[in-house]
Image (tube, rainbow, N blue to C red):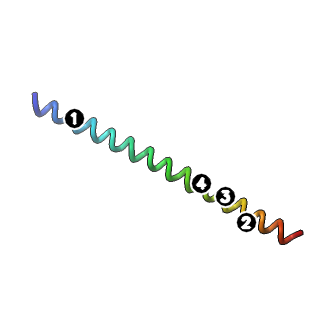
Amino acid sequence: MIQELMRVIESTDTEHREHQERKLGARYRRARQREERLMEERLMEVARLRLC
């Protein structure tokens, strides 16, 4: 009985940890994409200014 309870607790903890890792991964990916978009916008602005 105690071993079964320990297995359930360990499984729940592992699932929670994996969920948190996925959230952090998604947050990191969105931040990187946002940075890339800003860099592209700045490059386009520089290109536009040089053409004028």
Q: On the rendered structure, is 8 left or right of 47?
A: left
Residue 41 sits in quarter: bottom right
Element under disc 4: helix
Q: Which residue is mark 4?
A: 33
Where is 17 relative to 6, above or below?
A: below
Image-based side of 7 in relation to 18, left or right:
left
The residues bearing labels 1 and 2 have C-alpha atoms spaced at a distance of: 51 Å
The dot on residue 43 is: 2
Residue at image mark 1: 9
N-terminal label among 4 and 3: 4
Say what amino acid the circle numbered 4 marks. Answer: Gln
How many C-alpha atoms fall within 10 Å of the one at disc 3: few (<14), some, or many (≥20)?
few
Task: Tell me the distance, in whole angstroms, between the alpha carbons under discs 3 and 2.
Answer: 9 Å
Whichever of callouts 3 and 2 sits on the residue coming sooner in the sequence is: 3
Q: Nearer the viewer, residue 46 or 5?
A: 46
Amino acid type assigned to the residue bearing label 2 in the image: Leu
The spot of residue 32 in percent (x, y) is 56, 56
Residue type pointed to by label 1: Ile
Q: Secondary structure at mark 2?
A: helix
Mark nearer the N terminus (4 vs 2): 4
Dot 3 amino acid type = Leu
Residue under the point 67% across and 58% down: 38
